[in-house]
Image (tube, rainbow, N blue to C red):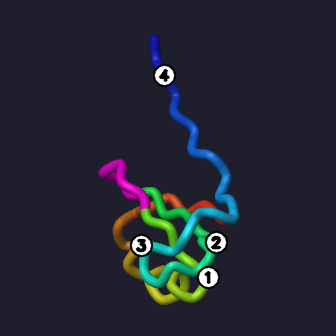
Amino acid sequence: MTTLLTRPELTAVDRCDRCGAAAQVRAILPSGGELLFCGHHAREHSTKLRELAAEIQQG
């Protein structure tokens, strides 16, 4: 049996891992980890996230 894990939608309690502002973007890394970013930090780190082949989910 295969179990599929789904990530919940971002809510008001989810916070940016860089500054603590409300998270607007979830970056899921190929290694399985995830990072939450506000819009500002998502834009700042977007190039590196693409290089890492992260899956980006807008909240």
Sequence order check: which comes first, mark 3 or mark 2?
Answer: 2
**In whole angstroms, how far apart are the C-alphas of marks 2 and 1?**
6 Å
Which residue is rendered at x = 50% and y = 67% of the image?
36
Upstream in sequence: badge 2 or badge 1? 2
Q: Type of residue at label 1?
A: Gly
- For this view, does 47 lie left or right of residue 43? left
Residue 39 is tagged as 1
Q: Which callout, 1 or 3, points at the residue further toward the start of the chain?
A: 1
- Tell me the residue at 48%/22% (across/down): 3
Q: Rounded to the nearest whole Å, what is the CA distance between mark 3 and mark 4? A: 26 Å
N-terminal of the pair, mark 4 or mark 2, is 4
Q: Is residue 7 left or right of 45 when viewed as pictured?
A: right
Q: Which is more foreground, mark 3 or mark 2?
A: 2
Q: If the image is split into quadrants, where does the N terminus sit?
A: top left
Q: Amino acid at mark 3?
A: Leu
Q: Answer yes or no: do the residues labelled 2 and 1 have beta carbons within 8 Å?
A: yes
Identify residue type, mark 4: Thr
Element marked by disc 3: helix
Q: Which residue is mark 2?
A: 24
CA gap between label 1 and label 3 equals 14 Å
